[in-house]
Amino acid sequence: MKRPIQIILSIVLAIGLVACGGRYSVPGAVLKKAIAISVDQTQQEISQQIKLASAPKVIVDRVKVTEQSPLKIEGIDSYHVKGVYDFTLKLSKRQDKQVDNAFDVYLQHKTEGKTQTWSLAQQSGEDWNLAAIE
């Protein structure tokens, strides 16, 4: 008898958490990919400077959002998201895990018909550089 009650309570809790996400919510998978793109860009720059043959692979493990606010970038709905993340750096012979790294990203969200696209927005002076998140 307890099992059906637990299932019902779990469903109600899950629906409540989704509903509380509000309309200002960036999907977790999109956020992880955006952070991975940012970290990857930094790793590639460092690898070039120290003349490594290839940049290590970065896997974002955990993301905790501490602040998220809507804004417009070039007139399109976007979000400024801050928080912390953990990642694993895969090297040729070993891997390192880094925890509680701060992130601060801008994400642009476009909807065309039924298609939604996300881009990582990086400010360069007065302009924005957009990188598609696949």
Image (cartoon, rainbow, N blue to C red):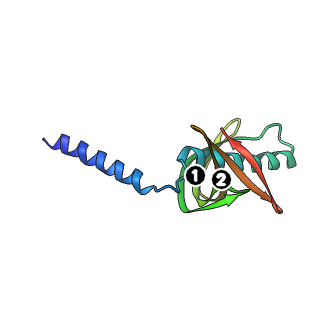
What percent of the width, then of the height, locates residue 92? 71, 35
* Image-based side of 102 in relation to 53, left or right: left
Q: Nearer the viewer, residue 16 or 43?
A: 16
Q: Which amino acid does label 1 sit on?
A: Asp
Q: Nearer the viewer, residue 84 or 56?
A: 84
What percent of the width, then of the height, locates residue 48? 85, 45
User: From what the image shows, is residue 41 above or below residue 54?
Assistant: below
Residue 107 — which label? Answer: 2
Residue at far left of view: 1
User: Where does the C terminus fall, quadrant-wise?
Assistant: top right
Crowding around mark 2 (Cα neighbors within 10 Å: few <14, some 14 to 19, many 20+) is many
**CA–CA distance between discs 2 and 1?**
19 Å
Q: Mark 1 — residue?
A: 86
User: Where does the N terminus fall, quadrant-wise?
Assistant: top left
Of the residues tagged 2 and 1, which is closer to the observer? 2
Name the residue located 58 percent from the left edge and 54 percent from the top edge: 85
* Image-based side of 81 in relation to 19, left or right: right
Badge 2 marks a residue whose secondary structure is: strand
Q: Answer yes or no: do the residues labelled 2 and 1 have beta carbons within 8 Å?
A: no
Number of callouts: 2
Q: Nearer the viewer, residue 16 or 35?
A: 16
Name the residue located 82 percent from the left edge and 49 percent from the top edge: 45
Q: Nearer the viewer, residue 114 or 120?
A: 114
Residue 64 — which label? Answer: none
Badge 1 marks a residue whose secondary structure is: strand
Name the residue located 66 percent from the left edge and 51 percent from the top edge: 108
* Image-based side of 43 in relation to 79, left or right: right
Crowding around mark 1 (Cα neighbors within 10 Å: few <14, some 14 to 19, many 20+) is some
Q: Of callouts 2 and 1, which one flags the residue occurring earlier in the amino acid sequence?
A: 1
Q: What residue type is labelled 2?
A: Leu
What percent of the width, then of the height, locates residue 14? 35, 48
